């Protein structure tokens, strides 16, 4: 039961000491600190307003700035938080990478410009992940705040996808959109990070007409697919049914139209894990479906093989050629790598890109690859233990598994929006588990929750304070 301040003030309080001993605290006593309240509002609107940062062209700046600011503010909280082993190894990997950059700059094995870009990835993506997680823990941001923000992103994705497809059907062309920043500064370097284009064209074969792929609010289509795994799984955890299904629909249609094959398989894996670990009904549903899937498996595998190796065959061949060239280059510096991406001799893309595995090998060598592998396994185990304690958190493990699969053909470089959202979600999942463990039996029905950011906004909009 949720009580409002009006409910509390309208009821007479018991006069006896015995009665007052069991009375739940009032909203004033239960209200969070001003630090937590401001943090919840900041992180909620930072995530929910993804479309605004996208159309302004400042998305690449917003998430690192807000993430590090939240960490700074969290250090003012007296609440101690232990950093899990997985995140400690994650930070160690960032340190190994920085050492690799320094060594290669000294020996001439890496270019200065690309080394600066790699350093930006370390601080703006890799270390940002740990910073945001830690900030959420110390600031005690609530789980449902992040989940609702993710749902709003999914609803916005649904709106622009429907708009884009209707526009294409009516006009025969894609809607032309552009960010305010690129409009004002057309010669902006590395403009892909500042654009606001809903679609991009891509050729399936050299002699075929290009097809469109949905980028939504992100830098490129594969990143839209990876982000949409989080959107689907985060929306799955939403309490409100309307928000939940609209958010899931927005994530699914984006994954479909972005045509990212890894993300499409990743969302299936994420849904399977969520159903299997989330509830007994989910496991029973999967078990009932298994005979049908077994009968249809030859057709399914045939279609999957055709989709991954024949559809967009030139893209597949290009990736394999890039991976082969990356591995050959890696053998010339196997222990510490080259620190930053190199220049490919066969494709017009950076050497050591388009796969987190090959990127890690090329830039940090076997040492970095070992450290990151330990970190990834340790984080996976921590999230799994979290889900075993609270099965309702199974979407977080599903999203992590989907991300892990997507990293076979993608990488975290420049994905600040992705890591900000997921790290915030994970940190709040830890908070929720801790809250459930500390909750006394009678408080489950009488706990008085502070206003959420959207409730505060509604009250302000309605002139109620």
Image (spheres, grey):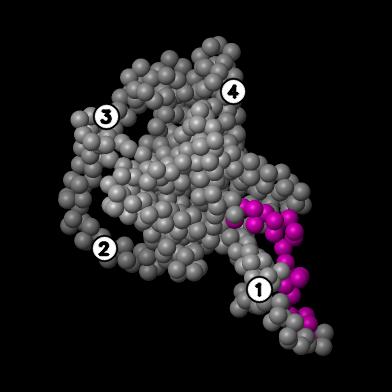
Front disc: 2 or 3: 3
Marks 4/2: CA–CA distance: 50 Å
Residue 144, percent from left and from top: 56, 62
- Eyeballing the image, is 9 above or below 282? below
Marks 1/4: CA–CA distance: 49 Å
Q: Which residue is mark 2?
A: 289
- Eyeballing the image, is 274 above or below 381? below
Give the quadrant of the C terminus.
bottom right
Is disc 1 in contact with disc 4, using a CB cutoff of under 8 Å? Answer: no
91 or 162: nearer the viewer: 162
- Eyeballing the image, is 132 above or below 332? below
Residue 247, percent from left and from top: 44, 60
Compare marks 1 and 3 and give the one earlier in the sequence.
Answer: 3
Which residues are drawn in magenta?
18-44
Q: Determine the image quadrant of residue 429.
A: bottom right
245 or 408: nearer the viewer: 245
């Amino acid at each position: 039961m949720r009580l409002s301040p009006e409910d509390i003030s309208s009821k007479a309080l018991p006069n006896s000491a015995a009665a007052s001993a069991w009375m739940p605290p009032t909203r004033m006593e239960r209200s969070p600190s001003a630090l937590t309240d401001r943090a919840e509002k900041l992180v909620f609107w930072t995530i929910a307003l993804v479309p605004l940062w996208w159309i302004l062209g400042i998305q690449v700046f917003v998430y690192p700035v807000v993430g590090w600011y939240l960490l700074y503010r969290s250090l003012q909280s007296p609440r101690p938080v232990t950093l899990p082993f997985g995140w400690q190894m994650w930070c160690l990997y960032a340190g190994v990478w920085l050492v690799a950059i320094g060594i290669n700059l000294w020996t001439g094995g890496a270019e200065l410009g690309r080394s600066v870009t790699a350093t930006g990835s370390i601080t703006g993506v890799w270390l940002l992940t740990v910073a945001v997680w830690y900030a959420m823990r110390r600031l005690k941001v609530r789980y449902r705040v992040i989940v609702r923000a993710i749902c709003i992103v999914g609803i916005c994705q649904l709106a622009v996808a429907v708009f884009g497809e209707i526009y294409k059907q009516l006009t025969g062309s894609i809607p032309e959109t552009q960010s305010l920043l690129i409009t004002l500064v057309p010669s902006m370097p590395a403009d892909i990070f500042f654009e606001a284009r809903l679609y991009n064209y891509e050729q399936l074969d050299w002699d075929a007409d290009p097809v469109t792929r949905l980028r939504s609010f992100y830098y490129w289509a594969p990143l839209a697919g990876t982000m949409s795994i989080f959107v689907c799984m985060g929306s799955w955890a939403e309490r409100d049914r309307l928000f939940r299904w609209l958010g899931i629909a927005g994530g699914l249609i984006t994954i479909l139209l972005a045509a990212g094959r890894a993300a499409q398989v990743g969302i299936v894996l994420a849904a399977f894990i969520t159903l299997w670990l989330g509830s007994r009904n989910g496991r029973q549903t999967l078990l009932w479906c298994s005979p049908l899937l077994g009968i249809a498996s030859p057709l399914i595998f045939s279609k999957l093989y055709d989709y991954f190796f024949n559809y967009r065959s030139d893209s597949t061949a290009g990736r394999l050629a890039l991976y082969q060239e990356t591995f050959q280059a890696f053998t010339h510096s196997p222990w510490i790598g080259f620190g930053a991406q190199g220049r490919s001799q066969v494709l017009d893309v950076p050497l050591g890109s388009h796969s987190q595995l090959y990127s890690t090998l090329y830039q940090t060598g076997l040492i970095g690859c070992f450290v990151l592998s330990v970190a990834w396994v340790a984080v996976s185990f921590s999230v799994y233990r979290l889900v075993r304690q609270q099965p309702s958190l199974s979407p977080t493990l599903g999203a992590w598994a989907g991300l892990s699969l997507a990293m076979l053909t993608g990488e975290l470089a420049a994905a600040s929006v992705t890591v900000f959202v997921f790290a915030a979600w994970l940190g709040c999942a830890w908070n929720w588990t801790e809250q459930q463990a500390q909750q006394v039996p009678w408080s489950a029905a009488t706990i008085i929750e502070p206003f959420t950011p959207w409730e505060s906004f509604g009250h302000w909009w309605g002139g109620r304070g």
